[in-house]
Amino acid sequence: MSMDKKTIGVSAESQHILDLITDKTLYRDQVDSARFAVSLALAKGLEPVDGSDLYTKWNV
Amino acid sequence: MLRVRSLDVENFGPYYGLQSINFGGKDGVIVVFGENMRGKTSLLNAIRFALFGKILGRGEREIEAHKLLNLQAKKEGASKFTVSLRLEKDGTMYDIVRSCNAPDTDNSEITIETVLFVGGEPQSQNRTAAILAELLPEQISRFFLFDGELLQQYEELLLDESEAARGIRESIESILGLPVLIHGREDLATILDDVRRAETRSAKKHKATEALASQLEILNAKLLTAKEQAKQIKNEIAELTKQREETEDLLGRSAKIEALLARRNSIEEDIDSLETQQEELSQSLSKMLAVSWHWPLIEGLNGRKRKLTNEYVELRGQIKAIERESHLKDLRSTAKKESKCPVCFGVVNPDADLEFSNRSAIRGDFSVLQTREEQVLGQINLLNQLTLDDHGPAAVEVSRQLHQLKMELQVKRTDHGDVMAQLLTSPTKEVEGARQTLGHIIAAVQKHKATLAVVQKEINDFESSIATAQQKLRATGEPSLSLETRRREIVEGLRDAFARAVDRYRDELRGKVEADASELFKKLTTEPDYERLVINKNYGLQIQHKDGFMVEVRSSGAEHIVALSLVGALQANAPLRGPLFIDSPFGRLDENHVERVVRSLPDMAKQVVLLVYKKEMSEHVARDMLKSKLLSEYELKRISAIHTEIERFSGDGL
């Protein structure tokens, strides 16, 4: 049985992209842009990547 | 034909290190793109510095040369900049290398060195000055190297009677070659004085003419003195006029300062308004972006909802069918048991086959269907509870508006920077004193002019008396005087011919300039109702409507087009054909006019160099309008605020 995620982590590369988005766009909070990224990934049917090098960024 | 072949600048203005532009030897147009503060005007100044050792700032005021040392180079300890200009005139190459060395800011330490090579041969310093003065006289250089933003000022000036207008009129007559005739007339007046004296000297040798000769001698002496006095007064008036021009310029700048301040305030208001709009739209977009994660899911969730709704409808149908079958089964069972139909109460044969319902088998398992129906309904209700924001298209529109605002703000901020730069270089303290000085100068000029009128009348009287005495001398019939008298009469005839020629040439030139300017104007303007241009004595041009009246009030764009027409006409009629360097030529023109002007540039001069920013004229306009006449394109690239590099990005037609 799958469990809902309690923590959300990002890779260093994703963090870099999040920083860029915060810097260059009007997303005020990185969690908003991260939500958008997740939502887009879901809509596109992308497969999750290996999460071994992620570090926890948000507790949900 | 004078042509600029190449320009090398080293540590000059924003150009750090050695930077070069090759203008080539072909007829056509070279475009140098550069945004504000990248160094377009510095390129014009580099050419001015090479030719005249001078650098002009805003309002054509001279700037001390050493201030143009590149700041990056200065930081690294350099104290010298060099400009090398290669010109070609009638097949001969002229290489001017001028450098400015300023080891300290103390002016006494500043040295400017100039070396001129003609056909590869170095020239002496004396020859250098003379050759350069002949190559492109400074007075007429404004029609070869000019700031497009000043174009309309020419036209404004040419329509009034100010000293500045006189200066420009003299420049125009100079480029058109009129001084050749004027100098001829003046030289002949000097020669006439000599031959008159010779005639008088000869007459004194004979008794019959001695008395008349003495009278003539006195008259000639008085005439010479009066002419000297007139010359001196004219020099003083010229000096005062120069002072008046400088003072008026200073006061003009005061009016300009007020205009600049008003413009700055207006721009700042615009910037505030745009920034407020930008902030409001940014906040609005930020709010939309906070729920932007909805947008990619909307399509999928709506699809899911549609699918579940369809499934629910299908399930409901199946459940109803089962319920109907079940009810029929109950009815059949009752009918069989009671031998009577429970619906119509008709008699039922107990042996009758009542199992016809078996022909439509009950589909599915009722309880499974009901469970599924509950699940589907639950999911539909869950999805209905999700309120997804669907403002994606609105966010795109807001984003577009924000981009537009950003562009407008950028333009306004650039304008603001320009206005501030002009304000910072405008003197303010001197203005008050200048007002008083101007009053004194005007009074002095009036006094000198009154004196000059008196002296001029004396000169006319002496001339008249001399003419009478000369007639008497001739009437004596002294044969030995005939040669001297004949010589004098020839010189008098020549002087009068030159005097008439000046007026006639001037009138004919005006007519040619008017015709050529009108022809060019009709090519440039988009207004078909404008018939032609009409020239005044100051070379000011007015637009004549096809119904015959003059257009009194002109837009700044129209001023610009008229001024460009004048420049083109002057180029066409000048004895010296040269290059046309225009800095920011299209600032006031709309797209249609820009296209027309660009298309006509090759007709205005054989070599045209445009210094433009891309908003003023895009690359595709240059390419579409000029086609093969576009020789090459350069870009002034920003490396830093004090370092620009010149980069050629197209053009092998040189």
Image: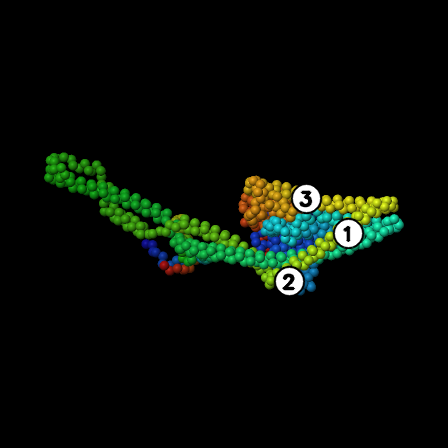
| Viewer-nearest residue: B197 or B98 | B197
Q: Are marks 2 and 1 in contact (CB under 8 Å)?
A: no
Residue drawn at x 68%, y 48% as measured from the top left? B173
Q: Which residue is mark 1?
A: B462
Q: Residue at x 73, y 54 (%)?
A: B455
Name the residue: 71% across, 49% down.
B135
The residue carrying mark 3 is B507
Counting residues from the N terminus, which is met first, the one under dot 3 or under dot 1?
1
Dot placed on the residue nearer the N-terminal end, 3 or 2? 2
User: Does any portion of residue B296 appear in the rendered image?
Assistant: yes
Instruction: Pick the residue in front: B201 or B245.
Output: B201
Q: Split into 4 quadrants, where in the image is the C terminus of chain A?
A: bottom left
- Marks 2 and 1 sit apart, C-alpha to C-alpha, by 67 Å
Chain label for disc 2? B
Q: Chain of mark 3?
A: B
- Classify the position of the N terminus of chain A by image quarter: bottom left
Task: Say whether residue B302 is left or right of residue B241.
Answer: left
Q: Position of residue B511 (x, y in %)?
A: 66, 42
Name the side, left or right, on which B260 lies relative to B289.
Answer: right
Kind of element beneath mark 3: helix
Mark 1 crowdedness (10 Å alpha carbons): few <14, some 14-19, many ≥20: many
Q: Chain of mark 1?
A: B
Q: Which residue is mark 2?
A: B77
Amino acid type for the residue under numbered disc 1:
Phe
Q: Secondary structure at mark 1?
A: helix
Relative to B418, B113 lies left or right: right
